[in-house]
Amino acid sequence: MHIREAGVSLSVEVRDNRTGLPATGLRLSLQSRQGDVWAHVATGTVDANGHANAWPLTTAECHRLVVDAEEYFAQTGTEGLYTEASFAFRTADPADGPRILLLLTPASLSAYRA
């Protein structure tokens, strides 16, 4: 997923760590924090290259990605521990759009800045 607004670029790649392949078909939702609540921005699906569709990035400083692990593992015939996982991240510096890599297994989700 590549997200741009006013020069800010956010790139997210998702791999199935069991196979080392892209987590094709995994559904992700992007949210932004507005005050004390999370507002839905968009939903996308990981493509064959490991990226989701481009989404508009809001001007909010704090964002959250929600990973639909249950649906993905059902598609791959695998029983996973988690039905959903999420993590929040900051984009405080408009000139510094992070690249985030997600590694997914049936029992874990690791996210790090690449």
Image (cartoon, rainbow, N blue to C red):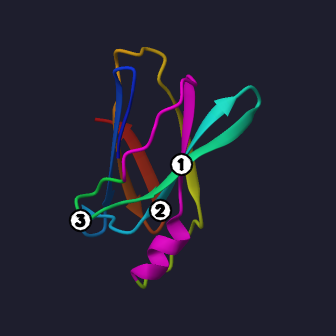
Under mark 1, the amino acid is: Ala
Query: Whole-percent x and y of residue 100?
Result: 35, 39
Q: Residue furthest right?
A: 36
Q: Which residues are magenta?
A: 53-76
C-alpha distance separating marks 1 and 3? 24 Å
C-alpha distance separating marks 1 and 2? 11 Å
**Rendered view: 104 above or below 38:** below
**Rendered view: 22 above or below 58:** below
Query: Whole-percent x and y of residue 41?
Result: 57, 43
C-alpha distance separating marks 3 and 2? 16 Å
The residue that mark 2 highlights is 27
SS at mark 3?
strand
Label 3 CA crowd tier, 10 Å (few <14, some 14–19, many 20+): some
State yes or no: discs 3 and 2 in contact (Cβ < 8 Å): no
Label 2 CA crowd tier, 10 Å (few <14, some 14–19, many 20+): some
The residue that mark 3 highlights is 21
Q: Quadrant of residue 77?
A: bottom left
The residue mark sitting in front, 3 or 2, is 2
- How many numbered marks are there? 3
Marked residue nearer the N-terminal end (1 or 3) = 3
Marked residue nearer the N-terminal end (1 or 2) = 2
The residue that appears at 75% across and 35% down in the rendered structure is 37
Under mark 3, the amino acid is: Leu
Q: Is residue 66 magenta?
A: yes
The residue that mark 1 highlights is 42
